[in-house]
Amino acid sequence: MNQPVDLRFDGPLAIISLNSPPLNIFDVAMRDELIGALTAANDVPAVRVVVLRSEGKHFSAGADLSEFGTASSIFEGRRIRWDRDPWVMLHELRIPTVVALRGTTLGSGFEMSMLCDIRLAAQGTRVGLPETKLGMLPAAGGTQSLLKAIGAPQALPIIALGEPIPAEEARALSLVHEVCDDVDARAYEVARQLAAIEPPVLAATRRLLRVAADEPIELGLATENRVGR
């Protein structure tokens, strides 16, 4: 039986593949394997970029909803899922992340992509957060990552209405950065371009951009001045 997550190293790249097709549902086993893969990638000094991709036609249809069946409420279910949390770990990796999306990319699958630095999508990809249609809330950071990426006015209908969004529309909204014919090949190309940048320079760039997104400009300018010396 295949492991739900596959990790391999290719020079400076750590390639993490969701490996439970056809829909790559996030269940406990996949989350645990993902935590292990992210930890391993982060701990190898030679790794400069993580590429996150999937096997099969789809990136991920989201969480295994059967996990909520034993919880006393949807909020308790979300708490239980956060006890096995790869999402914050992904966001806080020391190295940049490139994600290659394809096919169905919904719920936790889409939320995971929003925590990556560069998001690429194959033709025909559809992204979205359908949780509200099921009487739930996004459970992998979607309410925060979407707002930071595109602002509250555009994030609200995506979260509240739960409709899937075609790849080209997602690109226009800056939910993905590129729509590609061969998304894996493009992901590896972009990752190698990032890996060619001196790690301290790339790390400082990521840090400064995050400060700029989260803090007043005065603090951002002071941080840039300090880091650039």
Image (spheres, grey):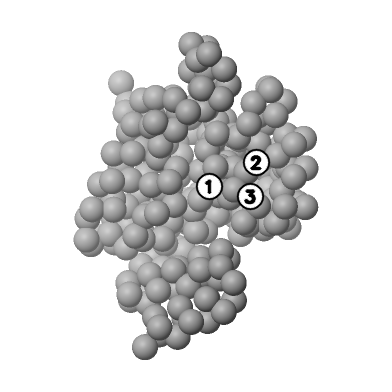
Residue that mark 2 sits on: 127
| Mark 3 residue crowding within 10 angstroms, few (<14) / some (14–19) / many (20+) | many
The quadrant in which the N terminus is found is: top left
Q: Which mark is residue 113?
A: 1
Q: Residue at x 38, y 70 (%)?
A: 203
Residue 191: x, y in percent?
42, 62
Farthest-out residue, top:
70
Residue 145: x, y in percent?
58, 50
Residue 143, image quadrant: top right
Q: Residue at x 52, y 81 (%)?
A: 221
Q: SS for tag 1?
A: helix
Do residues under tags 1 and 3 come within 8 Å of each other at their CB atoms? no
Q: SS for tag 2?
A: strand
Q: Nearer the viewer, mark 1 or mark 3?
A: 3
Farthest-out residue, bottom:
229
Residue 103: x, y in percent?
60, 37
Residue 225: x, y in percent?
45, 85
Q: Which mark is residue 146?
A: 3
Viewer-proximal residue among 18 and 214: 214
Q: In whole angstroms, how far apart are the C-alphas of marks 1 and 2?
A: 10 Å
Q: Amino acid at mark 3?
A: Leu
Q: Amino acid at mark 2?
A: Val
